[in-house]
């Protein structure tokens, strides 16, 4: 039986991820928003698939993650769930569906779990959202935290610059990470903070810490799929490593197709009935 047949595939769980941290095996995490792409990411052996609210940018063309709705996140998440056999699937709870109201936070988390079949949710922030985190965890839903650059509060900061360079902000971040661990979160994402601070956080908590622009001394790395594939055009922050130039591959394919249609080369007799 092939390792990719459903019967023999061993699912990644929160427990697997915890063990990986303790073994020192780095955790791989990538976003996916649809069935076809998630199927490839899962088959490649990704540990965690994040149905990120970056879908707002990458899928819908919005400037920020704020406009995407809970219904839209559930639509993306259900498509990903249908494709995946092994990866652990985490879904961002979108802006406005959990902040400042723990009952709504619980309702949103339960809708995601029930309607998409995903395995966990992710929320941005520390002490400000503690009640929501506790409430979601009380229902048995695994929660991933997200500290540092938190794009859902971009208008509070005004820029996407590196976070927690000042000592006060760095101290709060460490305290928030400890708080999230104490509440029972199974992992934390750290976005765009100094590598030294990320290392300190990873050592201060026992749960896996996944970085994006947080240096090498964390327990895993996450990137946005379309950025690392070179489909995204303008977005080239320092933390991004581009693993392919799909933009030019796709452009060539589209141009060839147009040419073949115009020249009547396509379809040929063998492509016709
Ligand atoms: N395509 C995409 N990739 C992402 O990584 C991503 C999204 N969208 N949307 C949601 C958040 C927003 N994120 C961001 C956004 C901007 C920077 C950033 O570094 N921007 C500028 C620098 C801005 C500044 O220094 O003021 C850059 O260098 O591109 C990083 C992460 C990460 N997430
Ligand atoms: C960048 C990652 C961590 C994320 O939250 C997203 O893709 O929405
Ligand atoms: Mg996000």
Image (spheres, rainbow, N blue to C red):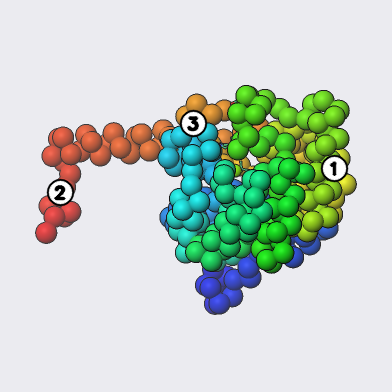
| Pair 3/2: label in front | 3
Q: Is mark 1 on a helix, strand or loop?
A: helix
| Badge number at residue 63 | 3
Residue at position x 86%, y 35% from top?
A: 171
Left or right of 36 in this view: 212: right
Q: Is residue 272 above or below residue 10?
A: above
Q: Is mark 3 on a helix, strand or loop?
A: loop
Q: Mark 1 points at which residue?
A: 175
Tag 3 and tag 2, C-beta contact below 8 Å: no
Q: Name the residue under label 2.
A: 268
Location of residue 239 in the rendering, given as x and y in whole percent from the top left corner: 66, 32
Residue at position x 47%, y 60% from top?
A: 78
Q: Which of 24 and 269 is in front in this view?
A: 24
- Residue 198 lies in quadrant: top right
Measure how far apart labels 1 and 3 are at the Cα level.
31 Å
Q: What element carries label 2?
A: loop
Q: Nearer the viewer, residue 103 or 265?
A: 103
Residue 244 visible in the current orientation: no
């Amino acid at each position: 039986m092939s390792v990719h047949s459903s019967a023999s595939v061993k699912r990644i769980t929160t427990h697997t991820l915890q063990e990986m941290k303790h073994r020192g095996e780095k955790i791989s995490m990538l976003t996916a928003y649809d069935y076809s792409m998630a199927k490839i990411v899962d088959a490649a052996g990704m540990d965690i698939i994040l149905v990120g609210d970056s879908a707002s940018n990458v899928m819908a063309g919005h400037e920020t993650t704020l406009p995407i709705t809970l219904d839209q996140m559930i639509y993306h998440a259900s498509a990903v769930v249908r494709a995946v056999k092994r990866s652990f699937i985490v879904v961002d709870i979108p802006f406005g569906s959990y902040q400042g109201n723990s009952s709504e936070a619980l309702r949103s988390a339960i809708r995601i779990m029930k309607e998409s079949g995903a395995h966990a949710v992710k929320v941005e922030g520390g002490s400000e959202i503690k009640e929501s985190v506790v409430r979601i965890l009380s229902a048995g839903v695994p929660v991933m935290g997200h500290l540092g650059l938190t794009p859902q509060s971009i208008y509070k900061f005004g820029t996407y610059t590196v976070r927690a360079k000042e000592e006060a902000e760095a101290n709060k971040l460490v305290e928030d990470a400890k708080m999230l661990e104490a509440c029972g979160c199974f992992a934390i994402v750290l976005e765009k903070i100094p590598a030294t601070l990320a290392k300190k956080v990873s050592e201060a908590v026992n749960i896996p810490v996944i970085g994006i622009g947080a240096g090498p001394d964390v327990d895993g790395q996450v990137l946005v799929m379309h950025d690392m594939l070179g489909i995204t055009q303008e977005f080239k922050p320092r933390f991004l490593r581009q693993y392919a130039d799909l933009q030019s591959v796709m452009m060539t394919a589209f141009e060839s197709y147009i040419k073949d249609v115009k020249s009547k080369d396509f379809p040929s007799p063998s492509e016709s009935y």
